[in-house]
Amino acid sequence: MNGNGGQGVRSPYSAFAEWLGTQKLEALKRKSVEAETLFRRTGITFSVYGSEDAGERLIPFDIIPRILSASEWRRLTVGIEQRVRALNAFMYDIYHRQEIIKAGRIPEELVISNSAFIPEMVGAKPPLGIYSHVIGIDIVRTSEKDFFVLEDNTRTPSGVSYMLENRETMMHMFPDLFAKIRVASVENYPENLLKTLESVAPRDLDREPTIALLTPGPFNSAYYEHSFLADQMGVELVEGQDLVVLDGVLQMKTILGPTQVDVLYRRIDDEFLDPLVFRPDSVLGVSGLFDLYRGGRVTIVNAPGAGIADDKAIYSYIPEIIQFYTGRAPILQNVPTYNCRKAEDLAYVLEHLPELVIKEVHGSGGYGMLIGPTASKDEIDTFRMKLQAHPDNYIAQPTLALSTCPTLVEAGVAPRHLDLRPFALFGDQVRITPGGLTRVALKQGSLVVNSSQGGGTKDTWVLQD
């Protein structure tokens, strides 16, 4: 339980390890089945698309938590807040004066020609100058003291409902553990999300803002989370057909008549927001919504165009971005990254394909990637051709020695690789929930933690001092 593949028990795990040593394997397996039953009864599923076994699935849940000490968490939160503020400063800059481009710190074409850059956002001023209000930062650990940011999620990050439900399930099944071990609470996330949304409402309101959560609908893979969060915050869950722009404001259709919406927490992609500005065939968004937003009559969370900050080609410049806007070195380091649009990086990547992880710049969910050390010769040859044909589409990273955590498997308790997605909220202040979503690769030796690729989740415990 040392967090990096060794056999010793790290101090944050000591109390839990003592308890675990008193448990029989069959009893733990029964608890695992009980957890699955609870999740199934609650309806916590996600959708898998485009495969033979497509459909609704439960994300496997492991009952052995991932544990961080209070001091480890403090170090992480300082780095996360620095990153969140720098990413938003970067977004404000590139949609306004573009000082970082003028200073030659980031290539102009990497921003302007990027599909995540929305020219219609140039000059737009969101409330408080914030573009990404809900951010998920994917973090991996490689040793006792070394944490690296694997990815920034600044568009529509998901997974927070699993963080909350994982904790509720653990507290239901192991109340004795929580009485024995002081674990920081995560239950105030919906309250903090609501505070964040209220804080970025249009400035000229003379009443409490009305908030709605915009979902693509029940067929979306994260629909459970959308309905869960709307219910927890006490706000309306709406689809595009429930909204209309009327008399210069965004109106929500209700049984009591139209109600003005001031803040729209959208969980649909930019291109579907407004058919008059983006995709004309979109039926998920609202005609005229973008003009209202530009005019300051409604706040969209996260802002259109926020995806430019989590583009994987931009990622390799994040240390430069943090230094530029904060005047300080990054507290949390990036994973070393080769940007294949650079000739020298491409040459290195092509020569070392069997050693590297190759990712599509716009890929997600564990798809469109090559894990060199476990790939076949045919897979490597196929990616070689892809890289040569479209180098701009790819980045490459070394295969990290990811930390492991004890995990319940058929044979007993064994180490499995994992990552962590803490959730940060940015409005009138930065609010970071202690812990986050731990994703675990359930297959022995696997480094892919995505649920769509067979990964599972764990409860994440941050110990209190």
Image (cartoon, helix red, strand yellow):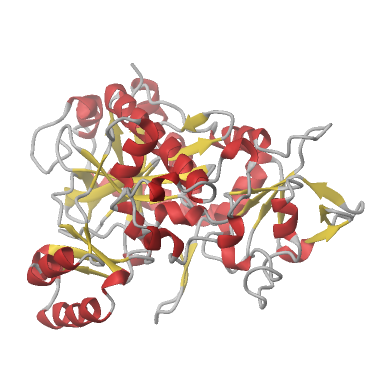
Quadrant hosting residue 433: top left
Task: Give me the residue at 13% from left, 49% from top.
Answer: 401
Q: Splitting the image into 4 quarters, where does residue 109 fall?
A: bottom left
Residue 272 picture location, percent across and down: 62, 67
Q: x%, y% of residue 445?
A: 15, 58
Q: Is residue 42 left or right of residue 54?
A: right
Q: Nearer the viewer, residue 293 or 235?
A: 293
In the figure, 440 relative to 112: above or below?
above
Q: Is residue 457 visible?
A: yes
Q: Residue at x 58, y 50 (%)?
A: 303
Asked whether residue 165 is in view, the answer is no
Residue drawn 9% across the image and 64% down it: 355
Q: Is residue 417 left or right of residue 315?
A: left
Q: Please give the name of the residue rendered at 39% of the width and 40% of the height, measured from the top-left corner.
A: 422
Quarter of the image where one finds residue 366: bottom left
Between 128 and 301, the residue placed more toward the observer is 128
Looking at the image, residue 328 sits to the left or right of residue 101; the answer is left
* Number of on-image labels: 0
Q: Nearest the camera: 247 or 322?
A: 322
Extreme residue in the right direction: 256
Q: Residue furthest top?
A: 465
x, y (%) of residue 383? Answer: 20, 77
